[in-house]
Amino acid sequence: MIKVKNLHKTFGDLNVLAGIDEHITQGEVVVVIGPSGSGKSTFLRCLNLLEKPTDGEIFIDDEQINSKKANVNLIRQKMGMVFQQFNLFPHLTIIDNITLAPVLLKKMSKEDAVKKGMELLSRVGLSDKADSYPNQLSGGQKQRVAIARALAMEPEIMLFDEPTSALDPEMVGEVLDVMKDLAKSGMTMVVVTHEMGFAREVATRVLFMDQGVIMESGTPDEVFGNPQNERTVKFLSKVL
Amino acid sequence: MNTIADFFANVWNDFYADFYASFIKEDRYMLLLDGIGITIKVSLLAVILGIIIGMIIALFNLSNSKFLRAIGKVYTDVIRGTPSVTQLMIIYFVVFASVHLDKWIIAAIAFGINSGAYVSEIIRAGIMSIDKGQTEAGRSLGLNAAQTMSRIVVPQAVKNIFPALCNEFIVLIKETAIVGYVGLMDIQKAGDFIKSATYKPILPLIATAIIYFVIIKVLTLLLGLIEKHLRKSEVR
């Protein structure tokens, strides 16, 4: 489903991604861990071209997305993205945040979009907030709305960029619960996070990144229980 | 006792004579009223042109094309770097020298061109004040650049831009007090005209100041109401 070949990304002199090869298949929940500055967020952002790769190829469903011919806007509709800072649209109500893209891009009628949006809101446990504005919600609630907003486009893949890092500790659980639920439903997910518990419990595969490359890849048991790479061992000893 | 009463009687008589000469005689108040019309006409058209030009130049300045950005930069530099009187006179006596348009329209075009440079900077700053995450969220949903701009960035920027834009309009109205240089009889010029007809400067100048003040005060109150309306979605 996602194929990455020899992906490089440099910012000026800084070599953030130094050659990544990765193959993610449908239904996988891939959790990317690693120290800050290891390039994991950049890797994720390259997958929907919020960062433009310097070199290498990315294929989604066998279509090369970083070629000149690719229709980036159409490809992005297949991939939902959830940000660390939520990035809800503060000038729109919660339900309008969710229905904006489907009405605009999928030519869905407003009524259908609202109906769908309300279903999604009840799925993340926030039906009563439909007519609120983002500023009236807590961080955890905002992030659950952001997930609902991404799901409204019916994506095939969901990308999570440190979705719980900006949350107060007591709100982390509610967001992880929604993500676990999503993983159970069979969604293909790529999650950059520092939540090792989530990685252990939910991931089908864990990637350890450092210095712009994938140092180690395996099931949670393999990576956490019996890490092969020296750097992985060092990193895990600090965070666990 | 008598002297004090006489004194006040004299003051009153002088004032009345001045007032009569300045405003009543030969219907001179009509000059001021017509002047108000000119000032408002020029300002209104200039504001509209200023917003249109400002939006275009702001888009130039924010575009990816080096060429368009260069045009935007030169425009802003030239307008900001020269006095508006000079710009007005160049546009009136040079650019539109052989074009038959009403004087006030030419003046409004000159002020619109001037205001556009400032408005473009206000718009640019307003758009840049919106967090980059907003654009990324829009694009990640599949919206193209134009849709993201019109549905997400601009509606938020408008609120930030509005107060600065109001300020620019107020400056613009007062700036039009130089249209006398190209022979238009606005409020300022009318006051000036009365002054030179009566050789009594105090009343016409004070009247000029009061008229500008009232116009701007009324406008400020109206714009304040609109701003309040714009901020409605910011309930917390």
Image (cartoon, grey):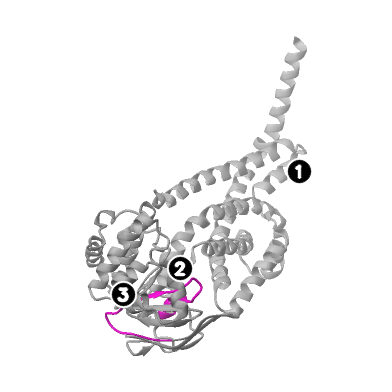
Label 3 lies in what chain?
Answer: A
Whether labels 2 and 1 share one chain: no
Q: Quadrant of residue A29?
A: bottom left
Q: Which residues fall within the magenta stretch?
A: A21-48
The answer to whether residue B182 is above or below residue A62 is: above
- Name the residue type under label 2: Lys
Image quarter hosting the N terminus of chain A:
bottom left
Element type where label 3 sits in the image = loop
Q: Amino acid at mark 3?
A: Ala
Please, which chain is the residue tagged with disc 1 on?
A: B
Mark 2 or 3, closer to the camera: 2
Quarter location, residue B64: bottom right
Residue A169 on image: x %, y %: 38, 56
At 47% from the left edge and 72% from the top edge, which residue is drawn? A35
Q: Secondary structure at mark 2?
A: helix
**Label ID, residue A238:** 2
Decide: few, some or many residues near mark 3? Use Cα within 10 Å; few <14, some 14-19, many ≥20.
many
Residue B224 or residue B215, whichever sits in front: B224
**Dot 2 or dot 3, earlier in sequence:** 3
What residue would you read off at disc 3?
A: A203
Which labelled disc corresponds to residue A53?
A: none
Provide the residue designation for mark 1. B196
Residue B132 rendering spot, x and y as whole percentages: 49, 67
- Relative to A133, A235 lies left or right: right
- On the question of residue A88 being in view, the answer is yes
- Amino acid found under the numbered disc labelled 1: Ser
Dots 2 and 3 on the same chain: yes
